[in-house]
Image (spheres, rainbow, N blue to C red):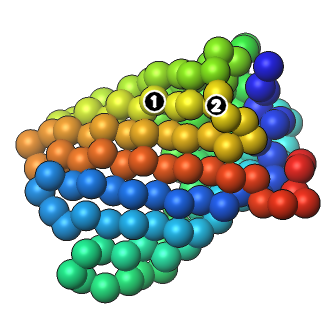
């Protein structure tokens, strides 16, 4: 049974972005979950984003994960609400409406300590699927 604390520590992160409107992209890097006072974790993803035909860039994004009952509440770095999910069932789904776009995520924890997140993003100017795989960094078992 997973809890928020199980995510603490470092993860290798690989990501494939299949964009119907192009260009496709890949991301390789790390995801670090660090304690953030109380019952929260700060997630920092850092690495190299390669856009097909456009080169490579350093990329970073940050989120805040907090306990909310049996669920995990995910917030943007500035504290705005993003989504919630229950990590205890092996898989979980959530969505986020960011006018005019819809973000739908499916988490898969069935291969723990390897886990996956697949985002489907649609809107007037967006149409992509982003598949991420998180693998615990050896020796960093929180």
83 relative to 75, above or below: above
Q: CA distance from mark 2 to mark 1?
A: 10 Å
- Rendering coords of residue 131 (x, y %): 42, 48
- Rendering coords of residue 102 (x, y %): 26, 33
Is residue 21 toward the left or the right of residue 98 in the image? left
45 relative to 105, above or below: below
- Rendering coords of residue 86 (x, y %): 62, 19
Mark 1 element type: strand
Is residue 102 toward the left or the right of residue 93 in the image? left
From the viewer's side, name the closer residue of 15 and 121. Answer: 15
Q: Residues within 10 Å of mark 1 (few under 14, many from 20)?
A: some
Q: Is residue 116 visible?
A: yes
Q: Which residue is mark 1?
A: 106
Q: Quadrant for residue 2, please give it.
A: top right
Q: Residue at x 62, y 50 (%)?
A: 134
Q: Which residue is mark 2?
A: 109
Q: Is residue 98 visible?
A: no
From the viewer's side, name the closer residue of 41 and 32. Answer: 32
The answer to whether the residues at label 2 and label 1 have Cβ atoms under 8 Å apart is no
Q: Residue at x 45, y 30 (%)?
A: 106
Q: Residues within 10 Å of mark 2 (few under 14, many from 20)?
A: some
Q: Quadrant for residue 104, please give it.
A: top left
Count of residue discs: 2
Q: Residue at x 37, y 76 (%)?
A: 50
Quadrant holding the N terminus: top right
66 relative to 1, above or below: below
């Amino acid at each position: 049974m997973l809890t928020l604390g199980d995510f603490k520590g470092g993860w290798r992160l690989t990501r494939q972005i299949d964009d119907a409107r192009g260009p496709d992209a890949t991301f390789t890097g790390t995801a670090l979950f660090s304690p953030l006072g109380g019952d929260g974790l700060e997630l920092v993803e850092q690495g190299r984003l390669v856009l097909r035909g456009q080169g490579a860039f350093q990329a970073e994004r940050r989120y805040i994960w907090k306990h909310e009952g049996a669920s995990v509440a995910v917030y943007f770095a500035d504290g705005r609400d993003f989504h919630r999910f229950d990590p205890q069932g092996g898989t979980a789904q959530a969505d986020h409406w960011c006018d005019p776009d819809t973000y739908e995520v499916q988490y898969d924890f069935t291969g723990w300590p390897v886990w996956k997140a697949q985002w489907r993003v649609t809107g007037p100017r967006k149409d992509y699927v982003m598949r991420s795989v998180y693998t615990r960094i050896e020796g960093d078992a929180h």
